[in-house]
Amino acid sequence: MKDLVTVAAVLGLIVVGFFAVTKEDTAPLQGFSGNEPTELIIAKGGVTYGEGCFATSTSGVLLTQDLENGCIYGTAAGAGQAVISFTLPASSTMTMIPKKGNCHEWFYDASDLTAATTTTFVAGPGHDVVGLDATGAGTGADVVDGAEFARMTSCRETNGDVVTFIQEYIHAD
């Protein structure tokens, strides 16, 4: 009888342990309802983000929705185009980074522009621009040369403004 009770107890523990094991979720991440996650999120296999590129060949004021996709693609407007100038959106319109400390990453693709073409990023209202050029120096941080790329991260500052960090990259191949 004692052996029967021991066997039943062991089987009970195995059954409880079987149901306590969580199944690995292989479904894609979905939006969070309720409280936002407050712990580190680890994604196996990497994370893909972005919705495509906003393509332009003219200077102008960038809109928040232009940056939300994660990419701006500079296209050549024709021979002799030497300067493109983009004004970053007002910090009050950048709803994709609503709280201080929130950041949004995007990039500028100037790879199809001639090397002589420069693109300047001008700070909009409530916006600061800082960064490094392709040589690692802080000079010309707001200017991206043609045939190059720039990674940009915009973050909400504690005073409500937005700072955009620009890092220019040159082709290695």
Image: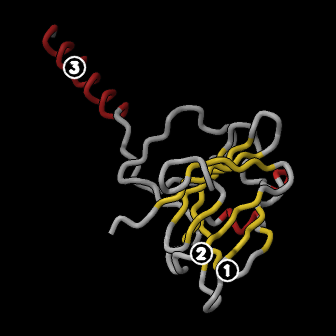
Question: Answer yes or no: do the residues labelled 2 and 1 have beta carbons within 8 Å?
Answer: yes
Residue at the spot x=19%, y=13% of the render?
6
State the residue lying farthest toward the left: 3
161 or 33: which is nearer to us?
161
Residue at the spot x=63%, y=88% of the render?
80
- Report whether 52 appears left or right of 16: right
Instruction: Tell me residue 169's x, y (percent).
Output: 48, 60
Please tell me whether mark 1 sits on a helix, a strand or a loop.
Answer: strand
- Dividing the picture into quadrants, the one containing residue 15 is top left
In the rendered structure, find residue 73 and report the number of the disc placed on it: 2
Q: Amino acid at mark 3?
A: Val
Other residues around mark 2 within 10 Å, as few (<14) / some (14–19) / many (≥20): some
Question: Answer yes or no: do the residues labelled 3 and 2 have beta carbons within 8 Å?
Answer: no
Q: Amino acid at mark 2?
A: Tyr
First in sequence: mark 3 vs mark 2:
3
In the rendered structure, find residue 38 and report the number of the disc placed on it: none
State the residue lying farthest toward the bottom: 78
Please tell me whether mark 3 sits on a helix, a strand or a loop.
Answer: helix
- Dividing the picture into quadrants, the one containing residue 11 is top left
Q: From the viewer's perspective, is the residue at label 3 or at label 2 nearer?
A: 2
- Report whether 8 appears left or right of 95: left
Q: Find the distance from the CA under tag 2 to the CA under tag 1.
A: 6 Å
In the rendered structure, find residue 10 and report the number of the disc placed on it: 3
Other residues around mark 3 within 10 Å, as few (<14) / some (14–19) / many (≥20): few
Colour scheme in the image? secondary structure
54 or 51: which is nearer to us?
54
First in sequence: mark 1 vs mark 3:
3
Q: Amino acid at mark 1?
A: Thr
Identify whether 70 is placed above or below 161.
Answer: below
From the image, tell me which residue sits under label 1: 56
Instruction: Tell me residue 147's x, y (percent).
Output: 49, 74
- Report whether 84 appears left or right of 37: right
